[in-house]
Amino acid sequence: MARIADLLAAGRTFSFEFFPPKTDGAQLSLGRAIGELEPLAPSFVSVTYGAGGSTRQRTHAVVSWMRKETTLTPMAHLTCQGHVRAEIREILNDYAADGVENILALGGDVPTDGEPAPSDYTYASDLLEDVVADGRFSVGIAAHPELHPRSPDRATDRKFLAAKLSRADFAITQFFFDLDVYVQMVNELADLGVTKPILPGIMPVTNKSQIRRMAELSGAAFPAWLAERLDRTDDAEEIRRIGVDTATELCQGLLDAGAPGLHFYTMNRSTATSEIYANLGLSPTR
Ligand code: FAD
């Protein structure tokens, strides 16, 4: 087992993100993806948390299973939306009892269906304070290179992000496609005196319409150069290949620029991540 802060202090980390499955079929797909990705020996893996606490049990089940049944070091995502302090204490106690040592403290979004559950927290930084004060976890936070969609302007986004990151061990970014947006964010935070590790989030394109929708929701720009490359074809396999090639180029650029590692959004599939890993020459015996 390992704390991510210690892993980052020792060198670059390479990590994979999964989401908790909703159906028996999705459960099998996740199991297969983990089985195929575990031999790549990632530094850690993470499991997302549903809006408003909707996957509390399922996220916990997957994280604890990974901890007990695999060689992987898991990190649990946790959001402040939909939780009061007593629930967060209970969730942290359950993770600590299962030997889980890493938490990603997030704002989360208010669920679009139904009444939002009561919450003692407004911002990720509020939750972060409680997880840091608990003392049993290495704690990460989210960063948005192209600004969080609710931020009124760049300076305000960076001010709150710098304050949040100065209290956490590391950040993981929303996905993006242009190297420059990552480098600019790292420089802006350094100008504000914050140099903690910021792991770039990598989302390989595997489906044109899905990635456009996700970029729109997350505030990531869908650059003209990428649209132009993808619009040359409607062949699914060719689109996947372009996605893997462009993600490989971005990853290599990030590593060359000094990124402290790479965090892959796997979408519970193994192929694109495995191919990028191979293209980058990342050794499973690292
Ligand atoms: P915050 O840090 O709270 O920021 C949200 C907005 O509030 C920003 O505009 C910020 O500038 C502003 N703000 C922050 N502090 C203050 C303050 N004191 N006063 C005024 N404004 C302030 N969502 C999920 O539901 N589950 C997940 O598992 C999940 N995993 C994610 C993993 C990564 C790596 C990333 C990048 C995002 C993830 N998200 C997840 C999405 C995330 O929850 C949303 O983007 C959410 O809207 C914001 O989360 P945050 O942690 O950045 O929030």
Image: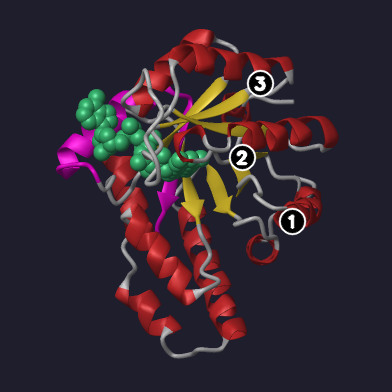
The span shown in magenta is 150-177
| Local SS, label 3 | helix
Q: Earlier in the sequence, mark 2 or mark 1?
A: 1
Callout 1: few (<14), some (14-19), or many (20+) C-alpha neighbours within 10 Å? some
Is tag 3's residue or tag 1's residue first in the polypeptide sequence? 1
> CA–CA distance between discs 2 and 3?
13 Å
Q: Determine which of the numbered discs, if any, sits on residue 95 in the image.
A: 3
What residue is rendered at 53% in x and 37% in y?
54
Identify whether 122 is placed above or below 213: above
x and y, in percent, of residue 263 in the image: 55, 48
Q: Which residue is mark 2?
A: 46
Residue that numbered label 1 is attached to: 33
Residue 192 visible in image: no
Residue drawn where x is 82% and y is 30% of the image: 68
- Report whether 216 appears left or right of 97: left
Camera-nearest residue between 280 and 200: 200
Image quadrant in which you'd find residue 44: top right
Please check the rendered image and state whether residue 157 is part of the magenta-colored stretch, yes or no: yes
